[in-house]
Amino acid sequence: MPDREFFFAVDVADEPEFGHMLGELVAVVLNHAGYTEGTIEELTDVLRGVLADGVSSGHRRCDLRFHARDGELQIVVARAGATEWRTTRPLP
C-alpha cells in the first residue's frame, strides 16, 4: 500500500457531548489511516483518559493533532502551560 500522508488538528473544549464526539472523530481519522477496529477502540480509550487527566488538572482546552507521514501516525495532545502528550504508531 502506498504511503499515506495527512495532518488533521482540532481545538477541543470540555463539553458535555465531547465524549461522543471524540469517539466519532478518532474513529474517522484512524479508519482513514487504515487501522483496525480494535486499535481504534484502544486509541480512543487512551485519548479519553489523557483528555480527562487534563480536565482534572484544570486544562479544559487542548489541541488534538494527528499527523501521518513516513509510515507512522503521531497523535499529540497539547495544552497551554502543560507538557504535550504524544504517541506514535506505525501505519498499517
Image (cartoon, rainbow, N blue to C red):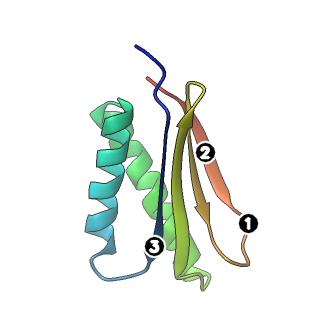
Q: Secondary structure at mark 3?
A: strand
Name the N-terminal-most of marks 2 and 3.
Answer: 3
Q: Given the image, on which type of amino acid does mark 3 rest? A: Val
- CA–CA distance between discs 1 and 2? 13 Å
Disc 3 designates what residue? Answer: 12
Asked if disc 2 and disc 3 are in contact, CB closer than 8 Å, the reply is no
Q: Given the image, on which type of amino acid does mark 1 rest? A: Thr
Judge depth for marks 2 and 3 and give the one in front: 3
Q: Residue at x 55, y 81 (%)?
A: 56
Horizontal and vertical percent position of residue 48: 43, 62
Residue 16 found in image quarter? bottom left
> Measured along the vertical axis of the image, is residue 25 above or below residue 18?
above
- CA–CA distance between discs 2 and 3? 18 Å
Q: Residue at x 51, y 61 (%)?
A: 64
Of the pair 21 and 47, the residue shown nearer to us: 21
Q: Given the image, on which type of amino acid does mark 2 rest? A: Thr
Horizontal and vertical percent position of residue 89: 55, 33
> Measured along the vertical axis of the image, is residue 65 above or below residue 30?
below
Name the N-terminal-most of marks 1 and 3.
Answer: 3
Q: Secondary structure at mark 2?
A: strand
In-image side of 39 versus 66 (left or right): left
In-image side of 76 versus 7 (left or right): right
Other residues around mark 1 within 10 Å, as few (<14) / some (14–19) / many (≥20): few
Picture quarter with the C terminus: top left
Judge depth for marks 1 and 3 and give the one in front: 3
Horizontal and vertical percent position of residue 13: 44, 79
Disc 2 designates what residue? Answer: 87
Disc 1 designates what residue? Answer: 83
Other residues around mark 2 within 10 Å, as few (<14) / some (14–19) / many (≥20): few
> Measured along the vertical axis of the image, is residue 82 above or below residue 36?
below
Q: Secondary structure at mark 1?
A: loop
